[in-house]
Image: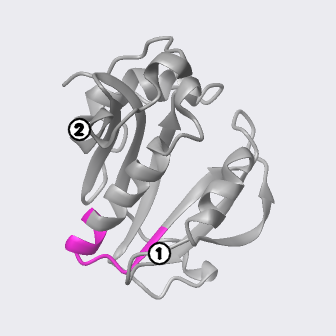
Amino acid sequence: MKGQVTQAHVTSQFPTSDTDLHVCLISEEGGFDLRTSELAPAPPKPVPAYPDAKALFHVGAYCGSVLASVGTFTLEDMDSDQGSQSSGRSWRIRGMATARDFRRLGFASAVLDHGLREIRKRGGLLVWCNGRTTARWFYRHHGFEQIGGERQVPGLQPHYRFKRAIGQPHHS
């Protein structure tokens, strides 16, 4: 199912039942338009965005037939100076994006939860990311630990680094 970026209205697109929310593995191409529109001003990465990744997968959450949220998970160790004890078994969240009209409705949480289950199946021990400052509450709510202060990179939104050990599912 190719991703669709549409101007949805929360009143008509809000999931009214569990069957309205569908989460699955998707192709990188399927999430490209949503990432491009929602991660601006960061320049879009051409497909394949992570050609050197040892392993990766992409997750999408749909509301009906509309792609509401996406995330990419790559097998990538965190810098050794930041407490990673999981060499070769660390996964990084990349390109997490949710369409504006679907924010704070559980779609990003569904993508993250699906991704964490997949990482557990693949033997991952740690997941980490650079999350925008505006998403800080989201990662902390899902049991991620903030590492250090806010980072400023030219051309990107301010962000923090987060990490979380993989083990039992996190219950908030």
Q: Secondary structure at mark 2?
A: strand
Labelled disc at residue 26: 2
Q: Judge left or right: residue 170 versus residue 142.
A: left
At 39% from the left and 65% from the top, the residue drawn is 76
Whether residue 51 is visible to the viewer of this picture, yes or no, is no
Q: In the displayed image of the protein, which residue is found farthest to the front?
A: 16
Q: Is residue 123 magenta?
A: yes
Which residue matches tag 1?
170
Which scheme is used to colour this image of the protein?
one colour
Coordinates of residue 54 in the picture (x, y in percent): 26, 60
Q: Quadrant of the C terminus?
A: bottom right
Q: Quadrant of the N terminus?
A: top left
Amino acid type of the residue tagged 1 in the rendering: His
Displayed quadrant of residue 101: top right
Coordinates of residue 135 in the picture (x, y in percent): 67, 49
Whether residue 130 is visible to the viewer of this picture, yes or no, is yes
Image position of 13 with respect to 88: above or below: above
Image position of 6 with respect to 65: above or below: above
At 23% from the left and 21% from the top, the residue drawn is 2
Magenta-highlighted residues: 118-127
Q: Judge left or right: residue 23 versus residue 155.
A: left
Amino acid type of the residue tagged 2 in the rendering: Ile
